[in-house]
Each structure stands twice: as C-alpha cells, then as structure tokens.
Image (cartoon, helix red, strand yellow):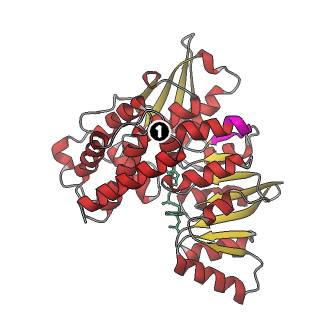
Amino acid sequence: MKKISILGATGSIGTQTLDVIKNDKENFELSAISANSNYKKVINIIDEFNPKLVSMVDLKAYDMVKNYCKENNKSTVVLNGVESLVDVATFDDADIVVTSVVGMVGLVPTLKAIEKGKDIALANKETLVVGGDIVTKAAELTKVKLLPVDSEHGAIFQCMQGNHLKDISKIILTASGGPFRNKKREDLIDIKPNDALKHPKWQMGRKISIDSATLMNKGLEVIEAHFLFNMNYDNIQVVVHPESVIHSMIEYNDGSIIAQLASTDMRLPIQYAINYPERKKAVIDKLDFYALKSLSFEKPDMETFKCLKLCYEAGKKGGNMTAILNGANEVAVDLFLNNKISFLQIEEIIERCLNKFEYKSTVDLDTILDTDKKVRKYVFDLYK
Ligand code: NDP
Ligand code: MG
C-alpha cells in the first residue's frame, strides 16, 4: 500500500490524481491533502477518502471544514495557514507527495518533503523554475526521486528508461501552440481573459491556461527540463505540435529519436509518476492511428510570443533570474485575469522586472524568497 499526500488536491491535477488512486484503491491510500479555499470539494474528499490530515490555507474555508468534521465525527485533523502546507508535505504517514499546488508557494513544502525523504511526484513546475538548483541538490543528497508529472517531462522520463543521460544529444519538448497559434502581435492586443482561458487541447487551472496562451508555460517547461534532466539550454528544443499526441521526445547521440505518444489526458503521466517504475492498467483512452491520420510540426514564433524567449534568456543566465521571471509572471497573470492589464502587458512586465532587479549568480533559499517578495511588491505597486 502506497500512502499519498497531495498539495493542491482540489485543482485540476489534484482532482485527476484522486481519480487515478480511486481506480486503484487496493494499492493507494490518501493520507493528507491541502487546498486554499475550496472547502466544498475538500469536504467531498474527506467523505470519500477519509484523509488523516487536511490543510486549508484560507481561514474561512478552514472554519467550514473544521466545523464539518466536528459535526460529523470525522477523525481528520484540520490545520490552517500557509505553513500547514509543510505539515501535509512532511506528514509521517505518507510515502510520496504529489505537488499540484499552483505557483512558487510550493517551493518550501517541496523542499521540506525532500528533506524528510519523501518521493515527489512533481506537477508544480514553478518550484523547479525558481529553486531548481537547491531542489535538485536536496533530492540528490536525500536520494529522493523527483518524478515528473508535467506531460512533457513525464514523456521525456519515459523515453530515458533503459538509456544513459550522457547519450542524449537533445530534448525535444512539444508544445500545442496554445489558443493563439498562428496569430500575429496585432491580433493579441485585445485578447480578454476568457479568450485566453480556452485551451484547444487541455483542460487546466486558470494560471497555467494563461501561461499556455502566452507560451510562458513552454518557457517554464524548458527551465523545468534543464533542472530535472541536467540538460544544457542549447540542447532543449521546442517544437510546436498542435495535435498534442507526441508528448515529447529525446534525440540520442546515434541519431535515434525516442518519443512518447498517448491521448491528451494528464491521468497517464500522474499514474506513471506515482507507480514508477511499474505500469498499471490504462485509465485513459488508447490511441487509434487510423483515426489520427497525420501529425504536424512547426517552429515556435518567439517574436510574437516573447515569453518563451525571455525564459530561455533568464534560464541561461541562471542565479536569481528565474525567480524574478516567475514572480513577475505570477503577478502579471493575476492582474490580467482581473482585467487590470492587457494580454501583451504580461510579457512587458516580465521583461521590465528582468532588467530592473539586480542579478545574483548564486542563490540560496532566503535569496529566492526575498527576490520573489520584492518582485511581487514592485509589480503590484505599479498597477495598484
Ligand atoms: P489549479 O488552479 O487547478 O489548482 C491549484 C491548487 O492549488 C488548488 O488545490 C488550489 O486550492 C491550490 N492553491 C491555489 N493557490 C494556493 C495558495 N496560495 N496556497 C495554497 N494552495 C493554493 O492548478 P492546476 O492543477 O492546473 O496546476 C497545478 C500545478 O500543476 C501548476 O504548477 C501547473 O503548472 C502544473 N501543471 C498543471 C497541468 C494541468 O493540466 N492542469 C499540467 C502540467 C502541470 P483551491 O482549489 O482551494 O483554490
Ligand atoms: Mg506541460
């Protein structure tokens, strides 16, 4: 029996993780979960899975869940506040932590889980973007597995099995191109949040949907791949593949390319990560090549979608640059979703922050947290 903690159990990845373990109840037990404010979903999860520990970051939502447990004689312990994410991440009765919280709020709990020796099924890419060096070093030290949940990284991880890192010449990250593929800059001026939230291939949370529309998501994934697979930025290539059937590929030194294909359903990379190295019975629809007919590929347009270019630049510089990039993006996406800035201002804000803040080539956790705080304040103050 594997015991699981989920950070961000009420979100898109959290819900799909619950679906995967529901289909495999003999092998998985849900030990602990966290959420921000969605108390209704948390109450449903408590009724169905009976976790031992729940963290609710929002105070009102905490009160609702706590009262529900009391009135219904539930033994679940309920905690409040952002610090309680660490309690869920380090819960004694869990073997593996699924990090499906959104944003760099996942960094500290992920690090604490690693220090406690928990394997990590990592969906929360912002954690690696801002703290890739310290997270991967901590995992090496404690011999903890960082199992990628992001579909591209899950694909690369699968293509690596039985091969050696040293034999890889290139990682090919596929991208759907997002809802505005083939659009030009003038078409992007009047984009509204609802247009940007409509992804052609994936149903996801709001933040990652906007990141997919700006191609920031692909840029964050380039940085994620750099840290997860210790790969040079020049050897990570993004290829637009609108059908989203090939989830990514590896080119080896001998010219062989190994790809992973499957239907567009996050439950497969989640299932593979939490069962690794085993493979379980499919929870997804299988591919039918007669129905697929053809697959196509394009070069990404980094002049129209500047965020991707900014990610390569910040990633290559390293140090605190990726924390600046990520902090600026998190606030900018929030401002855009609240109709405070336009779509194209997202990249403008990121570029401005990358130029404004002092570059530090090496970083520890305190520097990262401090950088993130300063960048957030700066962007908030600009549009207050
Ligand atoms: P969602 O927005 O759907 O879910 C986010 C989860 O985090 C919810 O449980 C939410 O709680 C919780 N949360 C939000 N803000 C806070 C906070 N400040 N403190 C504590 N908890 C918080 O996101 P997704 O599931 O789409 O994405 C999660 C992560 O996985 C992201 O890093 C994303 O990049 C990555 N990912 C997602 C994919 C997808 O298909 N969705 C694919 C690949 C990667 P509540 O519901 O209460 O607000
Ligand atoms: Mg992805």
Q: Residue at x 35, y 52 (%)?
A: 375
Please identify the quarter of the rendering in which residue 168 is found: top right
The image quadrant where one finds the C terminus is bottom left
Classify 294 as above or below 35. Answer: above
Numbered-mark total: 1
Which residue is outermost to the left? Answer: 186
Q: Residue at x 32, y 43 (%)?
A: 357
Is the CB of the residue bearing disc 1 within 8 angstroms of ligand 2? yes
Extreme residue toward the bottom, this view: 71
- Amino acid type at image mark 1: Glu
Q: Position of residue 12 (x, y in %)?
A: 53, 59
Mark 1 lies on a secondary structure that is: helix
Residue at coordinates 48% horizontally, 42% vertically from top-left? Answer: 129
Which class describes the residues within 10 Å of circle 1: few (<14), some (14-19), or many (20+)? many
Q: Quadrant of residue 28?
A: bottom right
Query: Considering only vertical position in the picture, is 188 above or below 141?
Result: below
Q: Which residues are magenta?
A: 140-147
**212 or 359: nearer the viewer:** 359
Q: Residue at x 36, y 40 (%)?
A: 177
Quadrant for the N terminus in the image: bottom right
31 in relation to 249, above or below: below
